Image: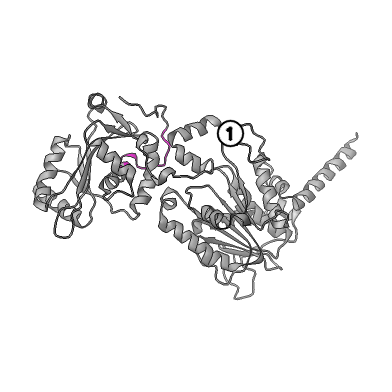
Amino acid sequence: MGYDTAMRLLELEKELHRRSAAERFPVFLDYVTPSYSRQWFHTLIAEKCQQLIDGTLGTDRLMLFVPPQHGKSEIVSRKFPAWVLGRNPLMKIVGSSYSADLAQQFSRSIQRTIDSQEYAAVFPNTYLNNSNVHSNAKGGWLRNIDLFETVGYGGFYKAVGVGGSLTGTPVDLGIIDDPVKDAIEAGSQTYRDRNWEWYTDVFLTRLHNRSKQILIMTRWHEDDLAGRLLDREGDKWTVVSIPAIREDMTLPEDPRKIGEALWEERHSLARLTDTERRSPRTFAALYQQRPTIAGGNIVKREWFRNISTHEFKRLHNGEPVVFFLDTAYTDKTSNDPTGIIATCKIGGDLYITHAQKVNMKFPDLLRFIPKYVTENGYTSASSIRIEPKANGLSVIDQLKESTPYNVVCTKSPKDSKETRLFAASPTVEGGRVVLVDGAWNEAFVDEVCGFPTKPHDEYVDVLCYAIDYHISNPYKPIDRRRLSRQVY
């Protein structure tokens, strides 16, 4: 084959690739980003998106459940809107996420793709204003971080955070990418209700008969937006659920054997297994798309580890004991007890050395607290941390005035107990909360594991405070090998 013939064949191959990129979204991913490492599941996601917009999916609503950091947003939120506008520059697209900032990041990325030479070669008729145009007062085609229009056509992409306004915005294609930010929001009934109300009262009101919807997310909670939609109108949605580790044969396009990782080169089976060991329930939700709360309880009895007093003393090595209090004192209107726990962090684990509840009048409580902390290991490195709610403020002020102890006013929580315990539960589930043997163990475990059906929840409060203080970030994985729930 001569040089000229080889060059003509190469040019023909390039032209066929360019034309294919215009017709097939998976090929477009490769064309505009030559370094893109397209895996089989990336192809599947891209094909489902194209089938949705072409009208061959069978429904006009697509749910995609994919593990974190596996490229779902790159395909659906960054590249798909650009490809859709290239094929039809009249399209009106809304892209939404849990925050306006993230939605705006998607908008920037789409604009960079449309501005690229590769995109211009595929879709020469779709382009944006060269200048930032924040207002259409002068008749210019809009282009800013929240909204950009296709020049000469008036199709657009609008970025909005969940909860934001869409007044006056007709939507041909609506994309919701991760409406939930983290475990705090997922565990909050208030946040879940807000998401649902925004979807029904704002997002849906902007759709018409031919509108298409895509919802992509990792599952945090069985009552998240996807869960509610599946419960109410599951037959109207096409669902593609791709687990990080294959467990069954329900997804026919999945070429893996049972037990294999989804993207071994990026997220190995060994790494996934370590993640699952730290928190099986969280892993089942975020990585396997199976959010469940068996029996309705947030924390399970078997998640707590136990250790003997003798073994704790061997490990202790002088680490300071920190006390947490949920204060109350009896009066004519209330008979809530005060809950107090003594805690110690050793390595990556939280040890609870003692817990007690008392029903006392204010003067008695002020005498009790110094005696309790002294008997349970208070030293000059210790602190007594009290929430500054109504009774707590009085206790804090009096203890600071009348005792030499290090009394600290903790921050008042903004979230409900349910939300905070949900967020803290992976730390307990991972075997990182250890109870030193004592008569108090059963009452403590019974109340925490019985929440929210128990009449009191002081131990729930102080446990959440202790995990937040000692572990700092209850969802951050700890790289350590010893995670078994060892009993001494």
- Is 91 situated above or below 266? below
In which image quadrant can residue 320 be found? top left
Task: Name the residue located 69 percent from the left edge and 66 percent from the top edge.
Answer: 151
Quadrant of the snapshot with the C terminus: top left
Q: Is residue 473 highlighted in magenta?
A: yes
Task: Name the residue located 56 percent from the left edge and 63 percent from the top edge.
Answer: 146
Residue 473 in view = no
Q: The residue under label 1 is which amino acid type?
A: Ala
Determine whether, in the image, residue 214 is placed left or right of residue 27. Answer: left
Disc 1 element:
loop
- Is 51 situated above or below 315? below
Q: Which residue is mark 1?
A: 261
Quadrant of the snapshot with the N terminus: top right
Q: Is residue 447 highlighted in magenta?
A: no
In which image quadrant can residue 424 be found? top left
Residue 154 horizontal/vertical position (percent): 67, 68
Between 394 and 60, the residue placed more toward the observer is 60
Residue 23 horizontal/vertical position (percent): 76, 52
The region drawn magenta spans 467-478
Residue 406 in view = yes
- Is 92 situated above or below 259? below
Residue 261 horizontal/vertical position (percent): 58, 34
Residue 282 horizontal/vertical position (percent): 46, 41
Label 1 crowding class (10 Å Cα cut-off): few <14, some 14-19, many 20+? Answer: many
Between 4 and 456, the residue placed more toward the observer is 456
